[in-house]
Image (spheres, rainbow, N blue to C red):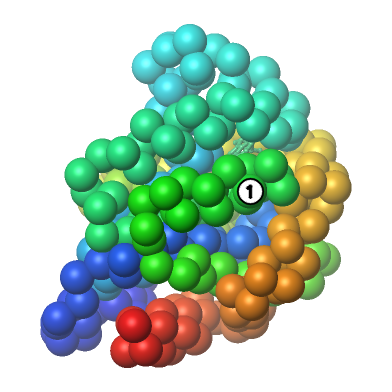
């Protein structure tokens, strides 16, 4: 897999982001792929609420048991549950120099709660990267998505297939098809996105913290655009 973060000087001098960075966009926009690249370069934790729930489901925790049926139907997990989990996570020391959210916030209530948390913790101005895509292309991206069990590396059987069927190029582990990446559940996830998450675009735009990224471009070009925005913000702080 081509990796735009692989240049030798990539991490030189970059110590965290000092703020919350949010990847906002519909399911399949490429948030997970970009998050892996950004977190490697800027040395901040990648906080994917979807991954946190899947981890809780695997471990059979009470939180996982609550989230599982909702996720299987493509519905959102209630705000109080998500917020409790996120607050616990960002209290960890690795989050002191900032963090990158992928899949959070997903409702206006979550966004308002995050604003309060960032204010209390005196973090820098939040950056929201809005990954703009044509919805028509997303079904193919999602039904074709395969994720490596060990390292979370992301493939697509149509557009970015692994060299060997069902096996990760990076670490040789098995590739899995997420149970909610089926057509019927994807339609529900789009409906939840349109109704509950899309209003966040205006919420952040009026606050002047939204930067749009053309997420229809190839993954390396998207990474380059994001780096430009983040490097600009770091230089200005
Ligand atoms: P994607 O962005 O590809 O749809 P995620 O892995 O981010 O998938 O999320 C999978 C599921 O986890 C969602 O459909 C939802 O049920 C649940 N979930 C994840 N993050 C949140 C959140 N911030 N609020 C509510 N539910 C969430």
Q: Where is residue 181 in the image (x, y as percent from the top left)?
A: 65, 42
Q: Residue at x 34, y 83 (%)?
A: 237
- Image height of 159 relative to 56, above or below: below
**Residue lying at 43% horizontally and 12% vertically, measured from the top left:** 60
Give the quarter of the image for residue 235: bottom left
**Is 115 rendered above or below residue 161?**
above
Q: Count of labels shown? A: 1
Residue 161 in sight here: no
Q: Looking at the rendering, which quadrant does residue 36 occupy? A: bottom left
Locate residue 163, reporting x and y percent.
Answer: 38, 62
Figure quarter occupied by ligand 1: top right
Q: In this view, does 234 lie to the left or right of 215?
A: left
Residue where numbered disc 1 is placed: 112
Q: Dot 1 surroundings within 10 Å: few (below 14), some, or many (20 or more)?
A: few
Q: Nearer the viewer, residue 182 or 33?
A: 33
Which quadrant would the N terminus be assigned to in this image? Answer: bottom left
Q: Nearer the viewer, residue 237 or 77?
A: 237
- The local secondary structure at tag 1 comes to helix
Q: Position of residue 152 (x, y in %)?
A: 37, 48
Q: Horizontal and vertical percent for residue 76? A: 70, 33
75 left or right, relative to 119: right
Nearest to the observer: residue 9 or residue 230: 230
Q: Does the residue labelled 1 lie within 8 Å of ligand 1?
A: no
Whether residue 108 appears in this view of the structure is: yes
Q: Residue at x 46, y 70 (%)?
A: 125
Picture residue at 50% right of the left edge, 76% below the top: 219
């Amino acid at each position: 897999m081509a990796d735009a973060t692989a240049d030798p000087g990539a991490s030189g001098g970059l110590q965290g982001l000092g703020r919350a960075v949010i990847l906002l966009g519909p399911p399949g926009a490429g948030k997970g792929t970009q998050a892996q690249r950004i977190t490697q370069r800027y040395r901040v934790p990648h906080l994917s609420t979807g991954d946190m729930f899947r981890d809780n489901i695997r471990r059979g925790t009470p939180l996982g048991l609550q989230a599982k049926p909702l996720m299987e139907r493509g519905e959102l997990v209630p705000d109080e549950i998500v917020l409790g989990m996120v607050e616990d996570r960002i209290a960890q020391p690795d989050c002191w120099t900032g963090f990158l959210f992928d899949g959070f916030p997903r409702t206006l209530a979550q966004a308002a709660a995050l604003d309060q948390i960032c204010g209390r913790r005196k973090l820098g101005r939040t950056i929201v990267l809005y990954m703009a895509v044509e919805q028509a292309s997303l079904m193919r991206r999602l039904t074709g998505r395969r994720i490596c069990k060990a390292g979370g590396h992301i493939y697509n059987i149509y557009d970015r297939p692994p060299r060997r069927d069902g096996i990760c190029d990076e670490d040789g582990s098995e590739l899995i098809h997420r149970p909610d990446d089926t057509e019927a559940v994807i339609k529900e996830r789009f409906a939840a996105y349109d109704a509950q998450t899309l209003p966040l675009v205006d919420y952040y735009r009026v606050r002047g913290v939204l930067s749009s990224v053309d997420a229809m471009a190839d993954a390396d070009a998207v990474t380059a655009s994001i780096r430009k925005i983040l490097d600009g913000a770091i230089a200005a702080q």
